[in-house]
Amino acid sequence: MSEFLTLGTRASPLALAQAHSVAAALELAHGWSRGTVAIKAVKTSGDKIQDRPLADVGGKALWTKELDMALAAGETDLSVHSMKDVESERPDLFVLAAMMERADVRDRLIGGGSIADLPQGARIGTSSPRRAAQLLSLRPDLNILPIRGNVETRLNKISAGDADATLLAAAGLDRLGIEAGSAIPIDVMLPAPGQAAIGIECRENDARVRTLIAPINHLPTCAAVAVERAFTRRLGGSCHSPVAAHAVAEGNAFRLHAQLLSEDGRESIIDSALIAGEADAIALAEAMLGRSPATIRALFEGL
């Protein structure tokens, strides 16, 4: 059987950069020639729809639907995802078999030195419910405007004055070689679950591909993201649900920091717990939901 693999990815510049990094890692791990892992770029619904927040038209599944179809049909052997864009419930047909080592989990503010330094009433472009709620929690005077598009498009919109500032993931900017913005400390803005992690998914019953992927799996990243995703899964939220979670290694366990917010940011629940496994992450989600006000509980289905 041929060792050649076909990797499916979104067609954006960032997604392609991530796909090439995965292909290069596989080729290095197995001593394959460059190009042994072919890359198939797929334009997803999320890339096609640019005029509305994705939460209004199908949520995170719009980033994965077409990739799933290609993988299920055998047109590709594996898919590469930005883990923060992957829904917490995945079809049983697939398995997230590996993750690359996590990069910088912070957000970067484009258009200002810090959130505190933004002018009164500044217009901030973001279509992320998490970022919008966190910004409003910190600065209720800010005006949140929807903004969509790839990294370059959003940077250009700020340059053109469509908004005063925006937030972008530091990991994405770094992978594109773009030096822009000011990093926001995690204790100011907790990142999205799975942020800065690149996931590699294949068919659950494809033992050959799972074996080939295994050498590039970064186990600490895989375990940390699994904890964050278990927490999110128990919440039962949607793309409308502002949630942040970040697991940090602490001895043989993880310290999971989490935040649930109302859409307007006026109410927020913040907590952390030492997590030995996914059951502990689920327990933290249940505890946080249990003491959340109605404005937050209404955004989740976990109760």
Image (tube, rainbow, N blue to C red):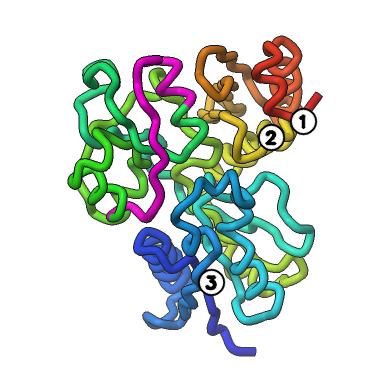
* Residue 141 forms part of the magenta stretch: yes
How many residues crowd mark 2 within 10 Å: few (<14), some (14–19), many (20+)? some
**Left or right: 301 with respect to 208?**
right
Q: Nearer the viewer, mark 2 or mark 3?
A: 2
Residue linked to disc 3: 8
> Label for residue 67?
none
Depth check, front residue: 139 or 2: 139
Residue drawn at the location 37% of the way across and 59% of the way down: 14
Instruction: Magenta stretch: give its range.
Output: 133-152
Vertical order, 278 against 39 (above or below): above
Q: Position of residue 231 (x, y in %)?
A: 67, 31
State the quadrant of the N terminus.
bottom right
- When asked about the image quadrant of residue 204, the answer is bottom right
Instruction: Of the two numbered discs 1 and 3 on the same chain, state the one appearing first in sequence.
Output: 3
Q: What kind of residue is marked 2?
A: Gly
Vertical order, 228 against 211 (above or below): above
Q: Position of residue 161 (x, y in %)?
A: 20, 41
Residue linked to disc 1: 301
Instruction: Of the two numbered discs 2 and 1 on the same chain, state the one appearing first in sequence.
Output: 2
Q: Nearer the viewer, mark 1 or mark 3?
A: 1
Residue linked to disc 2: 237
Provide the secondary structure element on which disc 3 rests.
strand
